[in-house]
Amino acid sequence: MNLQRGIASPAIPQIDAMDQNRGSSNMAEAVEDPVTGRSSGRVVANEDFNKQKMAKILRAFLLAKYLRNDSVPAELEQGLYLGSIGAAFNKGLLQNLNVTHILAVAGGVDMPFPRDFKYTRIEVLDSAEVDLAQHFERCFAFIDEARMNGGAVLVHCFAGRSRSVTVAVAYLMKKYGMRFPQALAHVTSRRKEAQPNPGFLRQLQAFDQQLELARKSIFSPVRIFLSDKRTQELQAAAAGFLIMV
């Protein structure tokens, strides 16, 4: 599908006032890199208000950059789109694509159009230590809900590179019986920015082994799970992409 940008430019959101008005606290929290969305592993006190405010300003600046340069999602499969935060704010284009659901795989991101889309947010940092796999089934159910009801879903994080990509790859593995390398190759062929962090890659490899064991225990040697025509097409396309690279 040749995706065109929406008729109107996506609106640039304001800095979350709730986050600005937290006030002082003795609690500490992990710092998320505003450029990559990944956890630095450091902690800062909430009372350090000025640094938090500057981080919010930088985040808003980077958000505006994604709105300008990365607001068109990639179509992975019919009814399944993948993108950055910029795509999540491109209301006009999302409506043109029949998107009805938005899955945000990131903490602290806005849900700007609650009257127009159904949202689910998975509050996770892009850190190799985060257990994203524990949220897979919840994500899969939300994606299937959109597609089974004739709509489409956008899966996004901040940069559209690691967290959302991991969920999308896992979904293709579970839904279509694709092995991990094939699913990752398929997603990468549609969105070149795709690059899950090392911890998420290990979780996808473990998920791949889990699914393969389940298939061997349930299905006969005829491999009934490959009988679906669309599954065969996706696997063939992914295999072709792996050969090319």
Image (cartoon, grey):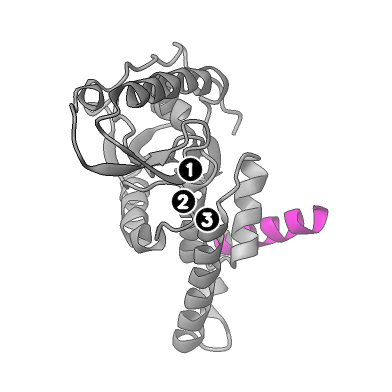
Q: Are there few (<14), some (14-19), or many (20+) residues within 10 Å of tag 1?
A: many
Location of residue 189 with respect to 110 vertically, above or below: below
Alpha carbon of mark 3 to alpha carbon of mark 1: how far?
A: 19 Å
Q: Residue at image x 50%, y 53%?
A: 166
Q: Which callout, 3 or 1, points at the residue further toward the start of the chain?
A: 1
In this rendering, the label closer to the viewer, 3 or 1: 1
* Numbered badge on residue 127: 2
**SS class of the residue under badge 3?**
helix
Q: Are there few (<14), some (14-19), or many (20+) residues within 10 Å of tag 2?
A: many
Nearer the observer, 98 or 21? 21
**Three-letter amino acid code at disc 1?**
Arg
**Three-letter amino acid code at disc 3?**
Val
Specify start and end residues of the magenta stretch as a single range: 231-245
In the image, residue 206 lies in the stretch drawn in magenta: no
Q: Residue at image x 33%, y 40%?
A: 107
Disc 3 + disc 2, Cβ < 8 Å: no
* Numbered badge on residue 169: 3
Pick out the residue farthest to the top: 8
Nearer the observer, 50 or 176? 50
Q: Is residue 182 left or right of residue 7?
A: right
Q: Is residue 52 left or right of residue 114?
A: right
Q: Are there few (<14), some (14-19), or many (20+) residues within 10 Å of tag 3?
A: many
**SS class of the residue under badge 1?**
loop
Counting from the top left corner in percent of width and height, residue 10 is at 42, 16
Q: Residue at image x 53%, y 68%?
A: 177
Q: Disc 1 designates what residue?
A: 38
Alpha carbon of mark 2 to alpha carbon of mark 1: how far?
A: 6 Å
Q: Is residue 8 left or right of residue 181?
A: left
Inspect this view and state whether residue 177 appears: yes
Q: Which callout, 3 or 2, points at the residue further toward the start of the chain?
A: 2
The quadrant of the picture occupied by the N terminus is top right
Disc 3 + disc 1, Cβ < 8 Å: no
